[in-house]
Image (cartoon, grey):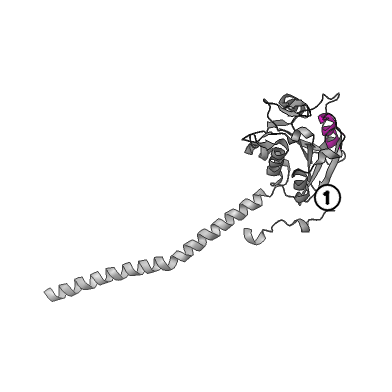
Amino acid sequence: VVLFQFRPQNESEIDPDKEPSKHLVIALDVSPSMYLEDSGPQGRQSRWERARDLLTAVMQRLDMEQTRVSVMAFYTEAKPVVIRSFDLGVVLNVLDGLPLEHAFEVGSTQLQQGVQAAIDMTRGWPPGSTTLIVVSDGDTVAGSVMPRRTPAIADVLVLGVGDPYRGAEVAGRTSRQDHESLERLAVRLDGRYHDGNALHLPTEVVRALTASLPQVTTRSELRTIALVLVGVGAGLISLIPWLLSLAGGSRSSRSGVRLESGSSGRSAA
């Protein structure tokens, strides 16, 4: 029954004009420091690549039929790159090393301004319909006003990338993950901070983050269970002839023994 009702998600069948029930907004740091290679378990990934891996792990769990994804890139200012897209391919293309920093003037990273621009995007959306993810190394100038979340935002996760202890050279200065500023931002937005430099997102964090977003994992898990049970059932059915043959052979052997015993008794008589 589960396999009969299961329909694989096909993006070409998603109605782009249908009002989604949930939104995912990503505030993405695209400054030159994000290309420094000091991230990952071995410290050989660029901060940008690490950010892509962390975000991909979250987005692959979403049901895009009911979710729209927006990306706000920020450096010296903030610019929307993706607005309410249902196509994960478009979003992943943005995360796949697209040189977005060339769209901005050279200068200092404005983290607070970028996050506030991402939050402003959610104004007018239904309350509790949006999850906000901020990805940055925290290498920014101090902002005068800290961002404030709107009623549309249900959950906030701040992901830090880059080595928080050892700095790397960029533009004649040393850059490292400023985890303290990222933690303050998470507290200000009543969200969570996670140091994603070397550690993947814990399962409980991903589960809590996507709790308010439609997911495809439940349907996929049911499909997997159904396939396993079909395999087990088919295996049991295939064993029936062998079991019947074994039972029949045993019965025949016992009958032969009884016949031989009876013949011996009559001969003795």
Q: Is residue 113 magenta?
A: yes
77 sits to left or right of 240: right
Residue 28 visible, this angle: yes
Residue at 47% across / 65% down in the picture? 238
| Residue 91, horizontal then vertical, whole percent | 77, 46
The percent coordinates of residue 71 (x first, y second) are 81, 42
Task: Find disc 1 in the rendering and name its residue.
Answer: 19
- Give the magenta part as a residue range: 104-118
Residue 148, compared with residue 260, is above or below; it is: above
Residue extending furthest toward the front: 172
Query: Is 53 a magenta residue?
Result: no
Q: What residue type is labelled 1?
A: Glu
Q: Quadrant of residue 54?
A: top right
Count of number-bearing discs: 1
Find residue 1 and report its horizontal and vertical position in percent. Answer: 62, 60
User: Under tag 1, what secondary structure?
Assistant: loop
Quarter of image, res 154: top right
Q: Is residue 122 among the parts visible in the rendering?
A: no
Quadrant of the snapshot with the C terminus:
bottom left
Residue visible at 71% across and 38% down? Answer: 51
Q: In which quarter of the image is residue 260?
A: bottom left
Q: Position of residue 83 (x, y in %)?
A: 84, 45
